[in-house]
Image: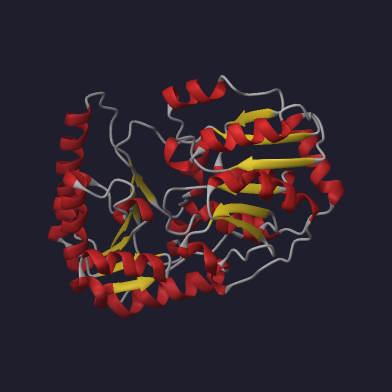
Amino acid sequence: MKSRIKMLENLPYKKYILHNANNQPLSPQILESYANFIILEHPKINSTTIRYLYSFFYTFYLLFTLNPKLIVVHWASRLYQNIPLSLWGRRVIVHTMGGDIDTKQDYWGKKKFFVDRLLGAARVISVKSVFMQEMLQGHNSGLKDKIVILSWGVEERFYQSITGVYKKAMQQKLFGRNFDFLFFSIRAFKPFYRQREIVESFVKYFGGQSNIALLLSNFGKDNEYFKEVSSSFTPNIFIHNIPHSQMHNYLFAVDCVISYSKSDGISQSLMEAVCAKRWVIANKLPNHSRLLKHKENAYLLEDITELPEAFEDIQRSILKPYYDKSLDSKVQKRLYLSVLKGYFNVT
């Protein structure tokens, strides 16, 4: 998110960031990194209902008093906030993610109502891929002429070429030991990403092998689900709290990234894994085919029961790195700024 916001830091305007109403204050380090922006934060309000109402009126107040030339909305799933934002729709560009518009996730009911209201009013909608563009047009063909494709690319820190010695040193730093092979199930610890099946398959295949390990992230952890799944952990399974600022170091320490989701737009974590030249094991989804090439830089599964075959194949195969301009953040920044100039006369 930060890298996307900072694409705008050199625009010659007063630039405000309204932080999410999630009761999570920004750290001094994050505030310092946005030196060219004015940060506005919501107060801490324990009641979810009151917090959302406050956000609704505060957003309306800011729009009315600041009268912005451009309104950039990251993620369309903002519920009540979308009402005032939609009233200024001609000045709005909305950057949508898969979870905003995917019916296999939570695009229905109240969320669908508010998302549709904002997308219908916005002047421009960005999506990360042709697949997401087609998904969105399937919901509402009237949005066709306002959709642009912006993949955002990947930060340069993920492009570093590393040696085997560097990888081993990073493993020592992060885990206090080395491994012959280290898998990383990179997605949120939720049923949607089939973490139980990944753990069970790993335990069955590698449970007694201390030199081969599985790393899990506790990002977005479903606590009840984690409690159930963690009961089967073996000593060669680790779970770490991984801030995105350190994700490149973890990718450089592992050999293979695993991602199995019931549906997907195009995951930023998979884009980063490709740039870091890591193997990827993922399910065969339409949107993955652009970046993931079966048995070249990835093993694409028809079904999650094929994981053992993927584990075996990846360990004996030679990676063929892949590049696409959608991964280049500099290319994507130029495209983004040209969209803002063309639609909003912001330059």
Name the spot of residue 135 as percent of width and height, x first: 32, 64
- Quadrant where the C terminus is found in the figure: bottom left
Name the spot of residue 247 as percent of width and height, x first: 61, 45
Q: Quadrant of residue 225?
A: top left
The residue shown at (26%, 23%) is 46
Residue 263 vs residue 97, the one in the foreground: 263
The residue shown at (66%, 68%) is 322
Q: Residue furthest bottom?
A: 342
Q: Is residue 334 left or right of residue 138?
A: right
Name the spot of residue 8 as percent of width and height, x first: 43, 63
Q: Is residue 174 above or below residue 35?
A: above
The residue shown at (32%, 54%) is 102
Asked whether residue 198 is in view, the answer is: yes
Name the spot of residue 303 as percent of width and height, x first: 53, 50
Q: Quadrant of residue 69?
A: bottom left
Q: Is residue 141 left or right of residue 196?
A: left
